[in-house]
């Protein structure tokens, strides 16, 4: 398949990526940019105590635009919305100054109930208006910390609800769903080589505490919170080649 510019392997379709500025959504964005002719991004602010994430999104987008000319041609508008009600509704470690811990239910208290369901619904509302019917998101069941709204089954059920509720043929694509963090690094490497890995290490943000003063081999963070530990281990395993090579080959553009 070719897009309007005749580039092989790119489908003439329009996609919207849920983009937070973290490693996973940056990899999902790169995946979309190698597949679809037109890609836009959407992000939300909801009183995250790490507003640093919102700065990271802008920096990642700028780095992709300047570093990947082919991707840049396909990368359209970025949309950012305020969902302050989500912060008011949730009492979690991501939106309040409380320590990250496991709650009585066994879920980390970083869980914002229904967050991804809301994000996808907002994304679909925007996608409906802008004819972006492929919704791409970086959720992952492998390292998902038990967040029930990261599950394949949840997201595909919601995709069906969106198709019915908006009477449009939306697809929800989650290219990272079955990958662990080491495999996510490998996917990024296959999609964008060292250059994309460098953007991920230098610009993306995962740390729950919003810490960016210390640079480790795997990027910036506190090094202690669950997100940092997951990313550190993933990077270490990837570098050591200690992961199963299940990553699909990417189309070369
Ligand atoms: Zn951290």
Image (tube, rainbow, N blue to C red):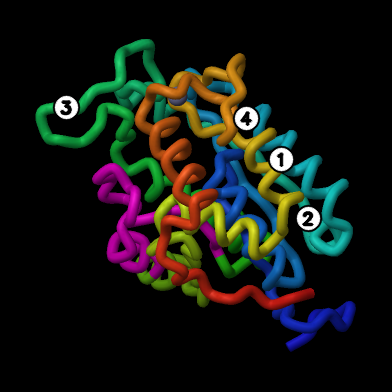
CA separation, marks 3 and 2?
40 Å
CA separation, marks 2 and 4?
18 Å
**Secondary element type, mark 3:** loop
Q: Earlier in the sequence, mark 3 or mark 2?
A: 2
Q: Earlier in the sequence, mark 2 or mark 1?
A: 1
**Secondary element type, mark 4:** helix
Report which residue position mark 1 lands on.
Answer: 60
Q: Earlier in the sequence, mark 4 or mark 3?
A: 4
Report which residue position mark 3 lands on.
Answer: 103
Report which residue position mark 2 lands on.
Answer: 76
Q: Earlier in the sequence, mark 2 or mark 4?
A: 4
The residue lying toward the viewer, choosing from 243 and 26, is 243
**Secondary element type, mark 1:** helix
Tell me whether circle 1 and circle 4 mark residues in contact (CB < 8 Å). Answer: no
The image shows residue 47 at horizontal and vertical percentages of 48, 22
- Is residue 4 toward the left or the right of residue 197 in the image? right
Tell me, for residue 54, which label it has, or none. 4
CA separation, marks 1 and 4?
10 Å
The image shows residue 12 at horizontal and vertical percentages of 73, 79
CA separation, marks 1 and 3?
33 Å
Q: Quadrant of the C terminus?
A: bottom right
CA separation, marks 4 and 3?
27 Å
**Secondary element type, mark 2:** strand
Q: Which residues are magenta?
A: 135-159
């Amino acid at each position: 398949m070719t897009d309007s510019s005749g580039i092989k392997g790119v489908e003439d379709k329009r996609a919207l990526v849920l983009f937070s500025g973290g490693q996973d959504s940056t990899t999902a964005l790169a995946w979309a940019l190698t597949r679809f002719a037109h890609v836009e991004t959407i992000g939300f602010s909801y009183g995250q105590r790490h507003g640093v994430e919102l700065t990271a999104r802008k920096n990642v987008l700028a780095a992709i635009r300047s570093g990947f000319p082919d991707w840049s041609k396909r990368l359209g508008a970025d949309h950012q919305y305020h969902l302050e009600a989500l912060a008011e509704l949730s009492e979690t470690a991501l939106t309040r100054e409380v320590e990250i811990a496991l709650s009585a239910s066994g879920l980390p208290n970083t869980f914002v109930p229904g967050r991804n369901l809301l994000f996808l619904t907002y994304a679909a509302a925007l996608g409906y208006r802008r004819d972006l019917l492929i919704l791409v998101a970086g959720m992952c069941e492998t390292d998902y910390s038990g967040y029930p709204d990261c599950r394949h089954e949840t997201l595909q059920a919601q995709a069906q609800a969106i198709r019915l509720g908006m009477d449009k043929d939306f697809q929800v694509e989650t290219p990272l769903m079955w990958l662990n963090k080491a495999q996510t690094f490998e996917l990024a490497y296959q999609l964008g080589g060292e250059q994309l890995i460098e953007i991920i290490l230098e610009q993306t943000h995962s740390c729950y505490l919003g810490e960016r003063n210390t640079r480790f081999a795997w990027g910036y963070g506190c090094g202690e919170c669950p997100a940092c530990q997951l990313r550190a281990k993933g990077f270490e395993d990837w570098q050591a080649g200690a992961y199963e090579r299940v990553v699909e080959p990417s189309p070369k553009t």
